[in-house]
Image (spheres, rainbow, N blue to C red):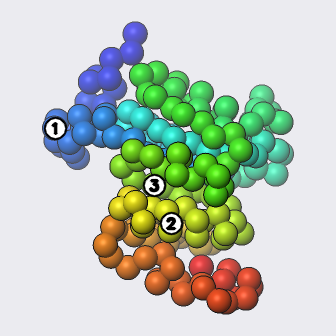
Amino acid sequence: MYDYDQAVARNLGWVTAAEQQRLRAARVAVAGLGGVGGSHLLTLARLGIGRFRIADFDRFELHNFNRQAGATMATLGRPKLDVLRQMALDVNPEAEIEGYAEGVQAGNVEDFLRDVDVYVDGIDFFALAARRLLFETCRRRGIPALTAAPLGMGVALLYFAPGAMSFEDYFRLDGQPELEQYARF
């Protein structure tokens, strides 16, 4: 039998009881559920986040096994969105999880980010147009956004707060050729 308070009890001390309840009521959007986003979703579910919007249009393939949560023989060919949604619900069966099987694009980005407390970036490195769209929409709507990009065996964590330096200001991608945009990111 699932009991939220017991499941997150060991978070207390790291967060207060009041903060844990804020996490339970929070809505987090995660776009991209592969090597980075899938792990983010599961970690946030274990932290006790209560509501998610998740997006991914891809399916698990054999080449995902070395780095992606959810990639197993049993999930080959299955949509990442369906697999990771179920894995997150296996951690917190009370979580509300809305899925966007077509990914995030200009036609649905506003709905994807509606009433979101924070955006967590997990989309593919080469999806710069989608990433720029998401970060610009977050900025315009006052939504904190973060990206944790793997770099070799390390990571670069970048947090873009409302009213602070934007993703575009930080990377200066506008007007740059595609290869230069990748290098700057």
Describe the element under mark 3 as helix, strand or loop.
Answer: strand
Is 48 above or below relative to 128? above
Say which mark, if any, is on residue 100: none
- Circles 2 and 1: CB atoms closer than 8 Å: no
Q: Residue at x 48, y 75 (%)?
A: 167
Describe the element under mark 2 as helix, strand or loop.
Answer: helix
Work out which residue is located at the far front of the displayed protein and give it: 107
Q: Which residue is mark 3?
A: 119
Percent x, y of residue 74: 77, 28
Q: Is residue 6 left or right of residue 45?
A: left
The amino acid sitting under disc 1 is Ala
Q: Is residue 94 left or right of residue 100?
A: left
Q: Which residue is mark 2?
A: 135
Q: Return the residue nearer the eye: 137 or 74.
A: 137
The amino acid sitting under disc 2 is Phe
Give the CA separation, mark 2 to mark 1: 29 Å
Q: Which residue is mark 1?
A: 18
Q: Return the residue nearer the eye: 59 or 26.
A: 26
Q: Is residue 69 left or right of residue 46?
A: right
- Circles 2 and 3: CB atoms closer than 8 Å: yes
Give the CA separation, mark 2 to mark 3: 9 Å
Q: Return the residue nearer the eye: 80 or 145.
A: 145
Quarter of the picture containing the N terminus is: top left
Percent x, y of residue 143: 38, 58
Percent x, y of residue 179: 74, 85
